Image (cartoon, rainbow, N blue to C red):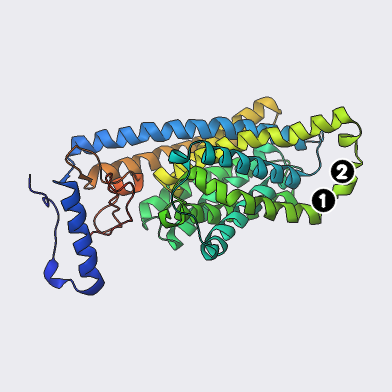
Amino acid sequence: MPANQGYARPTDSLDGADSRAHEDTLDLDAELGEVHLATPEERKRLWWRHAATNLLFIASWFFFAIILSVYNKWMFSDDHFHFPYPLLVTTFHMLVQFLLAAVLRYAWPQHFRPANSPSRTDYGTKAVPTAMATGLDIGLSNLSLKTISLSFYTMCKSSSLIFVLLFAFIFRLEVFSLRLIGVIFLIFAGVLLMVATETHFVFGGFLLVLSASALGGLRWSLTQLLLKKKDMGMDNPAATLFWLAPAMAVTLGVISLIMDSWLSLLQSEFFESFAASMKTIFFLTAPGVLAFFMVLSEFYILQRAGVVPMSIAGIAKEVTTITISAWFFGDELTPLNITGVAITVSGIVLYTYHKYRKSIESPVPLDPHGNPLSTDDEALGATYDETVRLTSSVGEGDEVRKRS
């Protein structure tokens, strides 16, 4: 099969930067050898292979996130451990995540330590804003758990999907589609039904969760952009966490220092004896291990599938959390709540079908071995009128190239 079969290359109309980009694409094809477009059968096989891998990461994310949510509710609830400083707890979690990322980075540098590192300018203008948005999202979410039920929290936090879609459009991480918007609003309608009969509504807690949702939409889009930055050494999820965690810890630590009384904490029953102190420190740090694996799973999903699919998976996680919360904490679910859950699940199924159809109907370039020239699920579902990413397996993640 000819090397360029299936591609339109209008070279006569190219000049300047477009011509150079076109030559780069030709060089890439020459380096890889013969390139062909996947058949419908090949596209189906590729979609299911990527879906299976993504499901493993999603299952890992579900597992650690649900355990951490239940743990946090237990820790902050007045009826249980009643620890009054969620922001301080989250700060400890960030420090633990940084230490674990550093262990991976130095123990297995061939896998978790990219050759490049961010410059001071890049770190200050790209990494720090992402870390601040992340820290505030997590901190405000934990702070809201002091005043609202876990079910109400997960219902309200699901509104982050709207903000995720908004920022994905702003940063051009997702192509505008009326079908996509329709599916997203169907899911959101299900969330509204779940909230409609909530009897434990607390306005302050609601505002905290809504603010966290907006920051969540921003931080996931910014994080996805960072995970594409090979020149900054951010294209590895563990390395990204290594660079973001310190700034996240500082952000939350400063807020906690302002809002929490650390001196009164040291004089409280949590540190009244050596045994009590050890117990408190354990409860402060142990969840950081869960948070580390949860965030690492999130980053891998984000890198492989993109911000909107990851958020859809997050909605499924929240529905699961609601069910577990109703069983574990006795939170009540009315028939209207259950209807909302059913509508939300239906929207998730429709979105999955939307992505499947998009992947099956779109051309996917393959190398001579039958492997896609991109490991990005978004690229597998893109068309030539959209941004098609060609990532060379030979070059181990060459920069994104745009097809003319």
Q: Label 2 to label 1, Cα distance in Å? A: 9 Å
In the rendered view, does 168 fall on the left or right side of 322? left
Q: Is residue 342 above or below residue 402?
A: above
Q: Which mark is residue 5?
A: none
Point out the residue furthest to the left here: 1
User: Label 1 sits on what residue type?
Assistant: Asp
Rendered view: 255 above or below 236: below
The residue that appears at 79% across and 44% down in the rendered structure is 85
Disc 1 crowd rating (10 Å Cα; few below 14, some 14-19, many 20+) is some
Query: What kind of element bears circle 1?
Result: loop
Residue 335 seen in the current view: no
Dot 2 falls on a residue whose secondary structure is helix
Q: Quadrant of the C terminus?
A: bottom left
**Residue under pointer 2:** 265
Q: Are marks 2 and 1 in contact (CB under 8 Å)?
A: yes
Q: Is residue 22 visible?
A: yes
Q: Residue furthest top?
A: 327
Report which residue position mark 1 lands on.
260
**Residue under the image location 32 percent in, 52 percent down:** 398
Q: Quadrant of residue 123?
A: bottom right
Residues 355 and 295: in front is 295
Residue 218 is situated, as x and y percent measured from the top left of the image, at: 54, 57
Measured from the top left, where is residue 201 in percent x and y? 72, 45
Residue 205 point in image, percent of width and height:
72, 49
Q: Earlier in the sequence, mark 2 or mark 1?
A: 1
Q: Quadrant of the N terminus?
A: top left
Give the residue at x 24% y 39%: 371
| Occupied quadrant, residue 89 | top right
Which of the 4 quarters of the picture holds residue 75?
top right
Q: Is residue 59 above or below residue 85?
A: above
In the image, 352: left or right of 99? left
Say which amino acid is labelled 2: Leu
